[in-house]
Image (cartoon, grey):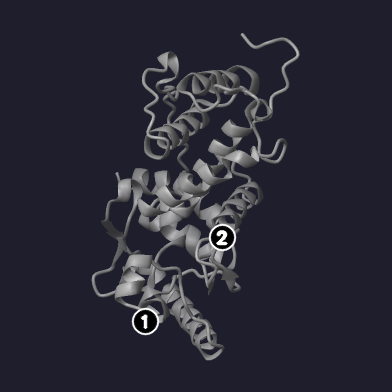
Amino acid sequence: VFPKGTTFYDRSEEGATPERYSSVVERLRKELRTRRYAYLTERSYVQWVERFLSYRGGNEKSELRPEAVKEFLGYLAVERKVAAGTLNLALNALAFFFGKVLRVPLGELGRFSRSKKPKRLPVVLSRDEATRVLRELRGTCSLLAALLYGSGLRLMESVRLRVKDLDFDRSQILVRDGKGRKDRTTVLPEKLRPLLNNHLKTVKAMHEEDLRRGFGEAPFWPALARKYPHAPKEWMWQYVFPAGRLSVDPRSGAVLRHHFNQNALQKAVKTAAGKARVAKPVTCHTLRHSFATHLL
């Protein structure tokens, strides 16, 4: 039950995080980076903690107590009506914040300990539908989507591929730091070999131009960069699908060439499904599910 007339602020853009908590948010970022969490995970966790701290404008004395987490989750479930997966993400972020940063375990949160996601069958395309969708794609998105369908890669696994991860001799792809931080190998489709070879020639020319201009570094792990200072500029460590332009790394501040924007691929696949008149909710992950099904 929420007090009548209460105004909630659980988005950082709606109500700024109280200034007195800026240092604790920085501690959160430092802890995430120390434990080598992915940048997208760091951004998501920080956003959820900021929303929690901005909740009710930061006026509650109990806001940094575990009891406030239960109230916040209740607000998300009842007022915001968020999905179970979103609720779990918020809980994971706050559990990390309280347990690893504040050193205050959340303890038992009752029904908010974990929300169960409804079990749903994955959307799978027929071979004809998959072909029609792929035909509507162009450029880098076309090759990436073909890899998702032909190799069963996840979205982020595909855009994070490095040149060294493609083994043409064995016709396989090495997936580093996949889901659960596990490595695995998958098939490199024979039909994509010539396309990938031509693509890599273009990418290498881009990399050589970056080097000529004094750039040429790809995002790299800080510990490895200290041990192998020249590695970030080496060809084998470059992304197979690099971004079209250089950008500033949000963590280090260095000018790097990041990987292709995953959101652009997601939008392209969705648009292609519409043009192909596939009456199913098609996403990048749909291509992965279709790969697994068509192997049976």
**Number of the label disc, if any, that sits on residue 98:** none
Foreground pick, 235 / 250: 250
Element on which disc 2 rests: loop
Q: Where's the C terminus, which quadrant?
A: top left
Element on which disc 1 rests: loop
Foreground pick, 32 / 20: 20
Judged left or right of residue 274, residue 240 is left
Q: State which mark lies toward you, 2 or 1.
A: 1
Image coords of residue 123 (percent x, y): 47, 37
User: Residue 216, can we see it?
Assistant: yes
Foreground pick, 289 / 295: 289
Tell me the residue that label 2 is attached to.
261
* Residue at the spot 35% in from the left edge and 50% down from the top edge: 35
189 in relation to 68, above or below? below
Image coords of residue 253 (percent x, y): 55, 68
Residue type at mark 2 is Asn
Tell me the residue that label 1 is attached to.
230
Mark 2 vs mark 1: which is more N-terminal? 1
Residue type at mark 1 is His
Q: Residue furthest right?
A: 5
Foreground pick, 235 / 127: 235
Q: Where's the N terminus, which quadrant?
A: top right
Q: Residue furthest left?
A: 170
Q: Which of the 4 image quadrants contains residue 102?
A: top left
Q: Residue furthest bottom?
A: 212
Q: Which of the 4 image quadrants contains residue 114?
A: top left
User: Residue 284, can we see it?
Assistant: no
**Mark 1 crowdedness (10 Å alpha carbons): few <14, some 14-19, many ≥20:** few
Image coords of residue 7 (percent x, y): 73, 22
